[in-house]
Amino acid sequence: MCGIVGYIGNAQAAPIILEGLSKLEYRGYDSAGMAVFDGEKIQTRKAIGRLKVLENLTKGGETMPGCSGIGHTRWATHGAPSDMNAHPHTNAAGTIAVVHNGIIENYISLKKKMKDKGYQFVSETDTEVLAHLIDYYYKGNPLEAITKVLHRVEGSYALGILFADHPDVVYAARKDSPLIVGRNDDGCFIASDVPAILKYTRTVYYLENQQVAELKRDSLRFFTVDEEEIDKESVQIDWDAEAAEKSGYEHFMLKEMYEQPKTVADTMLPRMKDNDIVIDELNMTDAELKAVKKIYIVACGSAYHAGVTGKYVLESLARIPVEVDVASEFRYRDPILEEGTMVIVISQSGETADTLAALRESKARGHKVLGIVNVVGSSIARESDACLYTWAGPEIAVATTKAYSAQLIALYLLAMKMAKVRGLLDERTFLGLLNDLRCLPDQIELLLGQKEKIQHFANRYLGARDIFFIGRGIDYAISLEGSLKLKEISYIHSEAYAAGELKHGTISLIEEGTLVVALATQPELFQKTISNIVEVKARGAFVMAVTSEQNKAIEKASDYVIYIPDITPCFANSLAIIPLQLFAYYVAVGRGCDVDKPRNLAKSVTVE
């Protein structure tokens, strides 16, 4: 969602803040702003639109001199996108500036109290309440004022705060919204995510919930909300800085699609040892794995779609009943978690608010939680009982590609591990599955090599109004993700349906020329899916089929066919999703859409 960057040190703050914010553009935003102490007062500049508007307004930061400052890119929640609603927000005197990610749930009652005390509000945001509250409690001690406010607000927050009376300090605080603190020889930083400060330091500290950081040029201190000082251990980030750059690709999304062979290999191969699967991170004995009676997979968006595939694979190989829940529904439907239930939460960022809440709900009920996460040290990674990292590296484009592929691999490995310890895979079958997994990186590379063919086809559908994706079993799971990829970056209405459900209503939407993308990678369902293709063809649909090389019969029923290499059917998603990603990408590019930063979307959704 929103992005925060702050700096205090020996260099000019504004250029560092602007550069850091540019590394967070993938999070999604509609306005941007900065506050910098110039030696006499806090200067504030805000602008609606892309970060470039703020850069031009401040001439790259040159018009905002000073060595301490905070910056923000806003994704609107309370109040429409506007200069007035953009962050930072200040008190009336302009002596306190605040940037905020998250939502203050009790801001209406707090705002009323502050108005009753004579405070005037100029924005529609919940954040302005914080600026006035800090002003109300400030009696010369910034830490005391901040902690008093944090005791009174409800909801989520990541905060960066400047005080004109204390220009040698930047304060930060966090609850349920991600915030990290970094340090190098020249100063200290705050940021919503690692890429923002990776150029300057690899030494970071992860703020925990309801912790406050006090940053000075040459020192860092950490406190609880009760003003008790605490010690924190730093973490060294080993990401390659080039991983967060485009490296000559037109878009991050395209670059990340082409990184999928490496991502799959990096997630898979270290866990394959001596023709076995070894997942030390599980922290579970074979006996404990055998004792699992049921699995809940909880996630949002593409991670949820990976979970749907995981359900089919786990149930097929390990014969464990699996339920897949959208995280925002799971936490509010009072799920029945029986003894022997394991909960798997999946999140690229490790900060997804609804998924994190589901994790906490599950742990509160006494159930073991396994996190499948891409970001080391993230909230879900820290709070899960065990964490299976996906090792995709930084994913910048809002629409996930490589992280999704890595999540699939993590679920495959887990399913095979559980199937083997439960005695459901003989050695020959197990080794065959391992060999198929090892072939995936090369097979993905082969499919990526078909980009020109797919681009040519995509150009025919730049003006499409509706596109439908259909499939059965795992193919339905693939359809869900293929449809989401298309709609989120091209803005074309797209839906995915279980192919057998077409005749129960959906087929009424098919008309002459409608594109239907039919997934058919499961041999036992080929004929059933071909029957569904014939049904939509009879209503005038144009059918693009994605199928395995053994299914040549589909050519008679379809208009256009993309073949994927033959593979064990339960792993087919890892191949079939590649042409669908490319199709979505080239449709979006052809329509002139902002592929990496689709409208209204954010990479890390840290509010409900």
Image (cartoon, rainbow, N blue to C red):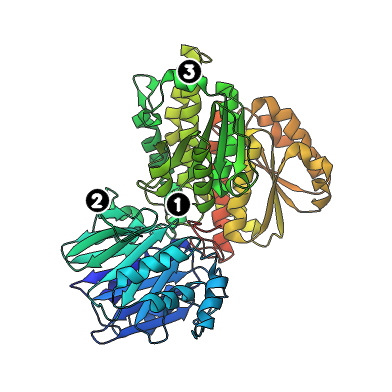
Q: Which residue is mark 2?
A: 234
Spatial CA distance of label 1 from label 2 is 19 Å
| 523 sits to left or right of 395 | right
Q: Which residue is mark 3?
A: 420
| 286 sits to left or right of 534 | left
Residue under the image location 59 percent in, 64 percent down = 591
Q: Which residue is mark 1?
A: 351
The reply to whether residue 296 is visible in this rendering is yes
Name the N-terminal-most of marks 3 and 2.
2
Label 1 neighbourhood size at 10 Å, few (<14), some (14-19), many (20+)? many
Relative to residue 484, is residue 128 depicted above or below?
Answer: below
Relative to residue 330, is residue 409 depicted above or below?
Answer: above
Label 2 neighbourhood size at 10 Å, few (<14), some (14-19), many (20+)? some
Q: Amino acid at mark 3?
A: Lys
Decide: marks 1, 2 in contact (CB < 8 A)?
no
Label 3 neighbourhood size at 10 Å, few (<14), some (14-19), many (20+)? many
